[in-house]
Image: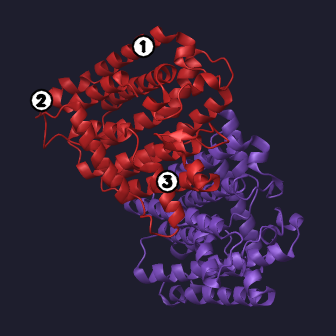
Chain colours: A purple, B red
Amino acid sequence: MTDQIAPTLPLSAWMKQSQAQIETALSDFLPPCAQVPTHLHEAMRYAVLDGGKRVRPLLVYAAGQLFDAPQDELTRAGCALEMIHAYSLVHDDMPCMDDDALRRGKPTVHVKFGEATALLVGDALQAQAFLILAQGNNAPERQLEMLQILAHSSGSLGMCGGQAIDLASVGMSLSREQLEQMHQLKTGALLRASVLLGALCGQQLSEDERAALFSYSHAIGLAFQVVDDILDATADSATLGKTAGKDAEQNKPTYVSILGLEQSQQLAEQLRLQAHQALAIFSTESNNTSPSSRTARLLQLADFIVQRSA
Amino acid sequence: MTDQIAPTLPLSAWMKQSQAQIETALSDFLPPCAQVPTHLHEAMRYAVLDGGKRVRPLLVYAAGQLFDAPQDELTRAGCALEMIHAYSLVHDDMPCMDDDALRRGKPTVHVKFGEATALLVGDALQAQAFLILAQGNNAPERQLEMLQILAHSSGSLGMCGGQAIDLASVGMSLSREQLEQMHQLKTGALLRASVLLGALCGQQLSEDERAALFSYSHAIGLAFQVVDDILDATADSATLGKTAGKDAEQNKPTYVSILGLEQSQQLAEQLRLQAHQALAIFSTESNNTSPSSRTARLLQLADFIVQRSA
């Protein structure tokens, strides 16, 4: 959500407003339950609506503020990213993958609707993500680039590739570099895409701007995972809304298992500062709005990602 | 494959040439086995390469001849459609769906690589399909429309929706109309998309042209399924390259079970004639090439779909 209406909104209120806006849009972008095939549409809506922090759409909104991007296009891109994320959770929770029964405090899709429907829910949500992004109203060339970014970041050289490496690494001893590579694909790629798509809703980007946004999103992507590992080791299931301690139980390598808790916390803080520094380029350019307001939300989200408790 | 080089090539030779061209392009459009994650890329290539009749790319090539579409763009669109088709087969074969062990004469992906990898193979192939289509060089507005068509035809109101209805109909008594609705989504949607995408690689379409192509592809889509049902009831597994007689065994409704064998064969022939008639519009327009050569391949493919033996 851009800040035209309430430029001084505190982060928590801005997040709440933005999340409500995304929730409404996600509902609008999904076929209604009453439409055939009703069982599939009911399950798709169950998988997407009423849950999650919507970190990816928040990053889209925040990055859109760099260039005053149109609100509707940001919402559309945010919903496409969130549908990709939601489909990956549905498939990731299935018995042949993580076999998880609880997600966002609710039974997972395959527990509630059956495995076959869960498989189709994920497949159909991925198609829906590309459909709504392909219907966007940015300049067609830019819209095509956004679709390329979404596809690349979610495919075998992005999210799916990270999941494949994750699968292959269960029970293995990974180095910190290997762990980072895995996470930069599994969760990082889609977070980087979120920042890029938000900015591209505003304008075409220079190489310097791309590099700065890459650096920012690379840092927060990694920070996101480090904090996830810290929370998995320290929080309880009720707080997380998902089964805590699964990583250790499944003998999966984590930052906490490799670096220990204290060093993991230090790393998260380092990454937060890196993210802040990466955005300096946008503060030195001349522009009509004050530098701080253009980057404020991205900076605040970097802080939020590191300091969150769930 | 367009006929510039060999305009008088018999259908079987044209199909063989086109299939070889698609095979090369599919290989080029897939990440190499040596690229990380190697296990996933190996499995993706296994799922896509060296098999199948490539009916969807053949329809793209044939429809492209209506408007002299550029060969490279047709190949790209055909590969995108084939990757969507291939991913759907991988997921469809999984234990929670059809639980099939044999496909195109080879062990299915989950049998050879494991269920978790099969799930990711399908997910990553879908993303790859949208990636390569988004990198196309048609006019950007048309390229976006092609992406919308691909997404719509493969999602919950297309292929995935048909699979959901199919799932729900196991063991149920379907009417002929319900069976037709299911198939028009499950396999028909992607076949219709193939014809449209091929034509759109050539030029923007008038409403009449769209309606004619819809009528043609609607007929061949249905014919394709009727013939599939006939073959499933009459051919053996070695000829089909997949397990024969599964539909009857799983108590799934088919055209043969509803109409009987003889009426099913009559229906297939009716649909073949409908497909021919639908293309009449393209023969009455004035154009530089002879009417017959513009529509020849589409007409021959309609015949092939009905008269094939595997």
Label 3 sits on residue: B125
Identity, as a three-letter code, of the amino acid under mark 3: Leu
Query: Where residue B66 sits in the image (x, y, percent)?
Result: 23, 35
- Give the residue furthest to the front: B238
Q: CA distance from mark 1 to mark 3?
A: 35 Å
Label 1 sits on residue: B265
- Residue visible at 76% across and 70% down in the picture: A13
Q: Nearer the viewer, mark 1 or mark 3?
A: 1
**Are the residues under badges 1 and 3 in a single subunit?**
yes
Q: Secondary structure at mark 3?
A: helix
Residue in the foreground of this view, choosing between B94 and B255: B94
Quarter that holds the N terminus of chain B: top left
Identity, as a three-letter code, of the amino acid under mark 1: Gln
First in sequence: mark 2 vs mark 3: 3
Q: How many marks?
A: 3
Identity, as a three-letter code, of the amino acid under mark 2: Ser
Label 2 sits on residue: B290
| Residues packed near mark 2 inside 10 Å, few (<14), some (14 to 19) or many (20 plus) | few
Q: Nearer the viewer, mark 2 or mark 3?
A: 3
Residue A191 horizontal side relative to residue B76, left or right:
right
Contact check, label 2 and label 1, Cβ < 8 Å: no
Q: Secondary structure at mark 2?
A: loop
Residue in the foreground of this view, choosing between A134 and B249: B249
Residue in the foreground of this view, choosing between A67 and B156: B156
Q: CA distance from mark 2 to mark 3?
A: 39 Å
